[in-house]
Image (spheres, rainbow, N blue to C red):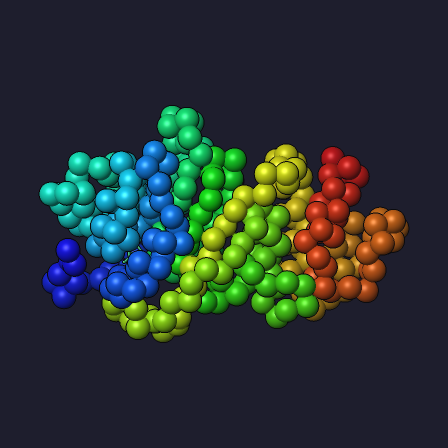
Amino acid sequence: MNQPYHRYHAKKRFGQHFLHDQYIIDAIINAIYPQYGQAMLEIGPGLGALTHKIEPLINKLTVIEIDRDLTLRLKNHSRLKHKINIFQQDALIFNFSDFSNKKNQLLRIFGNLPYNISTPLIFHLFNHINAIHDMHFMLQQEVADRLLAEPGNKNYSRLSVMSQYYCQMFPVISVPASALTPIPKVNSTVVRFIPIKTTVQSPIHIHALHRITKAAFNQRRKKIQNSLQYLVSIEGLMKMNISPDLRAENISVLQYYQLADWLTKNHG
Ligand code: SAM
């Protein structure tokens, strides 16, 4: 069933590194635990390392792949072609909400993400969070570390706060670089994302959270009384019991949430 990897030249511009380690591939599929009838959607199927293994377990699979050469292979595959629905396009502009509405189902999204777009893609997916049941993504270690970092950790960043606002996340599998062809420079981790349904996701609140986290982390060495001076007053900080002397990396997700609330109420 393996594809002839040696006959395909991976394209760097699409961040192509193909999984070949069957033990890791099985572990990823087990972690995803696909079931018949679910709206499974793979981003970047590539040569089909995950796609081929998932196909017998489900009745339908949708894939989004930007590379025409690769979509042609999938379209022509004798077994896969009966089950997959292929979008040959950029996942960064795919409308996940429309797709979920059309299917009348929440999406189960997964993929070994191209490292060059993983962060913007995660932000794009958060804009469609209400359409998503769960996500499993294989990510470069550095991105996984930032997603999962807690306050006080050097990896705690805007990505950590925004992601933890939208989702609960769990590292599920560590993947050595040697499991991929061509071998990347770093190891990866598969992260499970479970959307937090109770989070208030009004667009105004989210916009405020973006403004606060950008201002705070763009000047992460500064005290927030300085980095946030145009957004939240010192009195405001005191009222929320947030010390003006704190720096971006010492503010919890809940406190960022409060700061965004404050900004929403005080600056409309
Ligand atoms: N899933 C395969 C595997 O694990 O072997 C391939 C993973 S490879 C890291 C990333 C895949 O995403 C490639 O097939 C690449 O062509 C595709 N890709 C890159 N940029 C994309 C984009 N903007 N939209 C959709 N697919 C993209």
Does 126 appear above or below 216?
above
* Foreground pick, 52 / 26: 26
In x, y percent, where is residue 210? 62, 48
Res 190 visible: yes
Tell me if 134 is positioned left or right of 48 in this view.
right
**Who's the residue at 75% across and 47% down the image?**
258
Q: Looking at the image, is 2 positioned above or below residue 60?
A: below
Quadrant of the rendered image containing residue 108: top left
Q: 211 or 50: which is nearer to us?
A: 50
Residue, x 23% and y 38% (percent of image)? 84
| Residue 252 placement, left or right of 126 | right
x and y, in percent, of residue 44 in the image? 31, 50
Tell me where residue 146 sits by quadrant. Answer: bottom right
Q: Quadrant of the C terminus?
A: top right
Q: Quadrant of the N terminus?
A: bottom left
Residue at 62% x, 48% y is 165
The structure residue drawn at horizontal position 59% and vertical position 63%, both measured from the top left corner, is: 149
Q: Is residue 159 left or right of residue 71?
A: right
* Residue 98 visible in the displayed image: no
Q: Position of residue 136 (x, y in %)?
A: 42, 51
Q: Tell me: residue 156, above or below residue 58.
A: below
- Viewer-side residue, 262 vs 150: 150
> In this figure, what is the number of numbered marks?
0
Q: Position of residue 85 (x, y in %)?
A: 25, 36
